[in-house]
Image: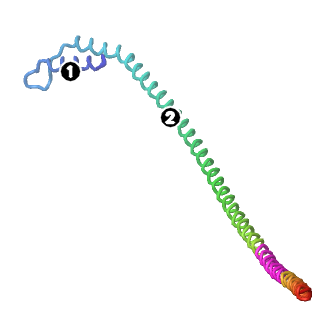
Amino acid sequence: MTNTDILLEDLEDVLDDATSMPMTKKSLVDVEKIKTIIEDIRLNTPHETKQAKAIIDSRNTILDDAQKDAQAIVAEAQAQARELVARDQITQTAQAEAAEILARAREEGEANIRDAQARASEILGNATAQANDMLAAAQKNKKDSVNAVNNYAEDTLLAIDDALYKALQDVRSIRQNLMRNIGGSN
């Protein structure tokens, strides 16, 4: 409570304590006491007015500072928001580019796989054809070799047969000559 408030209460107390004049609405008061209280109010009023003005000025300064701080915070928040939006746009652009690169890589990979499969099929087809040709040539060589061996064996057996036949004939002839020679000497 300020001094002025106290002095005003004192003034009210003096008025409450005033003696009423009979038959009128008027009261008898201690004029000196009231004058002293009014003088004290006048003396305190500039001081309290200065304090109130200082409080108001301080309040205004605090409000101005708060408003400046609020503006600075809003400006910083807007800057951060712009930065976040820019980052988000950069992120979205990077994600879009990454998705595009990934899609191209997949397409190239699938194309490379198709090319490799086509080349593998072609190589397998050529290898199969060559293997079939080699198998056919080997079977022909085998057949030719078997025929050659059979022919050689046949020729060799015929030659042996002829040689045996001749040898047998020679043995028969020698035997007959021996028999003749043995029989003629007897």
Q: Which residue is mark 1?
A: 12
Label 1 crowd (10 A; few <14 / some 14-19 / many >=20): few
Q: Position of residue 157 (x, y in %)?
A: 84, 83
Mark yes or no: residue 8 visible: yes
Q: Amino acid at mark 1?
A: Glu
Q: Main secondary structure of the magenta part?
A: helix
Q: Position of residue 13 (x, y in %)?
A: 18, 18
- Viewed as shown, does residue 172 lie left or right of 63? right
- Viewed as shown, does residue 176 lie left or right of 39? right
Q: CA distance from mark 1 to mark 2?
A: 43 Å
Q: Position of residue 96 (x, y in %)?
A: 65, 57
| Residue 20 among magenta residues | no
Question: Foreground residue, 93 or 66?
Answer: 93
- Viewed as shown, does residue 26 lie left or right of 119? left
Residue drawn at x 82%, y 83% as measured from the top left: 150
**Quadrant of the frame with the C terminus:** bottom right
Question: Foreground residue, 139 or 77?
Answer: 139
Nearer the observer: mark 1 or 2; the answer is 2
Residue drawn at x 65%, y 54% as measured from the top left: 93
**Quadrant of the frame with the N terminus:** top left
Q: Amino acid at mark 2?
A: Gln
Residue 67, numbered circle: 2
- The magenta-colored residue range is 126-151
